[in-house]
Image: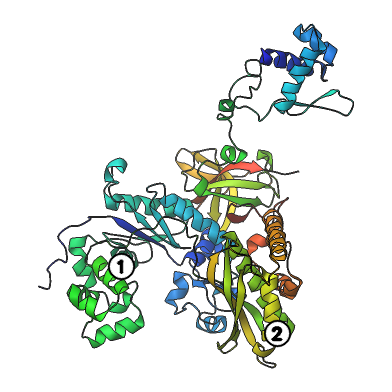
Amino acid sequence: MIDTPLTLSDFPKAILHIDGDAFFASCEQSLEPKLKGRPVVTGKERNIVASMSYEAKQRGVTRGMALQEVRKLCPDVVVLPSDYETYSLLSKRFFDIVRRYTSAVEEYSIDECFADITGLQRPHRMSYSEIAKRIQTELDRDLGTSFSVGLGPTKVLAKVASKWNKPSGLTVIPGNYAHRYLAKLPLEKIWGIGPQTTAYLEKEGLRTALDFARRSEEWVKKKLTKPHLEIWFELRGESVLPVVTEEKTDYQSISKMKTFRPSSSDKAFIFAQLSRNIENACIKARRYQLAAREVICFLRTQNFEHHGVELTFSRKTALPNEIVNSLKEHYERLYRPGQIYRATGVILTKLEQDVIRQLDIFDAVLRVERMRKLFAGVDALDRRFGKHTVTLGSSLAADHHNDQLRERGDSAKRKTILFKGENERQRLAIPFMGEVG
Amino acid sequence: MTSSGQSKILSYYKNHRRMPSFSEIMTLCGYKSKNAAHRLVQRMIKAGLVEKDASGRILPKNLWGPIPVIGTVEAGWPSPAEEELVDTMSLDAYLIRNKEASFIMKVKGNSMKDAGIFPGDMVIVERGRDPKDGDIVIAEVDREWTMKYFRKRSGKIYLDPANEQYSKIIPKEELKVAAVVRAVIRRY
């Protein structure tokens, strides 16, 4: 019983999961030789750890840890501001390199993807694991950062495989060997099974992923929900979750949140931060031709408490001035004098396609149409001259703050070392490897 | 027939460094009427090759189109045919070979001045290449990037500056070459 396979076939499908090892920190290390072999942490601009190198991880640094604590733990740590521009450029290249071998690539997050390579052994004249190895080698060679690769017959097993041996690991889990890996995998390590479900399953007497996979389909259906049933199938080597290659264009909600430093209790400044988040969220919404019926604005205090308001609109909107105006009166109640805040955030929800379906009697549709045209113009200017070329006056205080931060060295290196013809807002879309003598 | 009229006008422009007048076009193309010359010019205006100024004189506009990479000047006056443009490439494609492996760096210091590389220049480098003798490479020396000629003499490897005021770097241990320089770009 113990060594009975869950399935008899090895790769009815062949799915790769490829995962950047400490991606942001290792991007930084690949671009700057001084950082190699040293504990490196990104997230200076937020005062908490966004990503840490393996050297820092070994010393006990974890994600989200306060930088103060990191410095105590690890006095020789190098703390860097996040350079999302460079990370995004490298992330795009990561996906493009994987696409050299298959077009079925799901960009799961900035440093992770799934790739379906089913049936490609013949065209590539390589076995599945050779393809996996080749992709891993090319990523390492072309980008200079390491990736962990997992190969399995399903997405869930591929993910188990890529996590199995990090960093730089390549783990192959054929369906008929999956049980040997799952026997060693605690429940909470399964992708898609959270702490709640883990606690519940443990109460039912399960310990490992294998215990779960060996339960009957009826049992899973009776005790759990549909997503868990899908995981159960996938653990058993039966692929039910497809690799989704389309770019995401439909959002349930769009959220923008930003931490500022130092924390502040300045009423006008915090409003400007909210206003800037609203603008950013609206820019994204307009890019996907979406508009919101409901907007949640919240403040995060120094103690990580949240206070928020929910704004409802009679007509869907993606225009920041409308949202900012209706926020104004609520802000009086939301903001508490003396309270110290560290971040503000905005969530646009109840998103719909932004097309006018009917004329309502109160609204001057013409006025709205004029505003939409105005913001189409704003978007065009921003595309040409850089984000926030045209901005709401209510956001200006946030910009001023950022300028000051830049002087304090909180801005990424790429934004300060410029080539002739580049400016602070727009630079060449090629990753910058630094200065060379 | 049109293109022969056009090519006569273009070669006139090439030889005289000005556009011909309508009566000169008549002589050039052997037309009997100014109207024929006028029709030819109208066609060329439509094709975006020439334009007229306020007084009606012909001005060159975009006589040559994109610079053709294949074909000689004599054999191939730019034909507006689209298939000719298939054989052109963008500046990006010209400068960058392996797109995913290419990075930019900013030059500081004068150690490569005799190779024509100066402070402030942008170099496009390609990661993960095996360097050949004579390549300009980006190597890691004392935890910093350095750009030098890569030399291989009877199995011995060293880094060679292009400036006599700098000395050769002979690595004590393994030399770490991160990238090979593929292009230098300078904007004025």
Crowd band around label 1 with a 10 angstrom C-alpha radius: few (<14), some (14–19), many (20+): many
Q: Which quarter of the picture shows residue A343?
A: bottom right
A132 w.r.t. A397: above or below = above
Report the residue at 47% width, 57% height from top.
A247
The scheme the figure's colours follow is: rainbow
Q: Which x, y percent locates residue B124?
A: 59, 46
Query: In the visual, does A85 lie left or right of A7?
Result: right
Q: Which x, y percent locates residue B4?
A: 68, 13
Q: Nearer the viewer, residue B162 or B172?
A: B162
Q: Nearer the viewer, residue A392 or B40?
A: B40
Disc 2: host chain: A
Residue that badge 1 annotates: A160
Query: In the visual, does A414 lie left or right of A105?
Result: right
Decide: marks 1, 2 in contact (CB < 8 A)?
Answer: no
Residue that badge 2 annotates: A329
Quarter of the image where the N terminus of chain A is located: bottom left
Secondary structure of the residue carrying tag 1 is helix
Q: Which quarter of the picture shows residue A48?
A: bottom right
Q: Which mark is residue A101?
A: none
Quick one: which residue is furthest to the front in this view? A361
Label 1 is placed on what type of residue? Val
Label 2 is placed on what type of residue? Glu
Q: Which x, y percent locates residue A56?
A: 47, 74
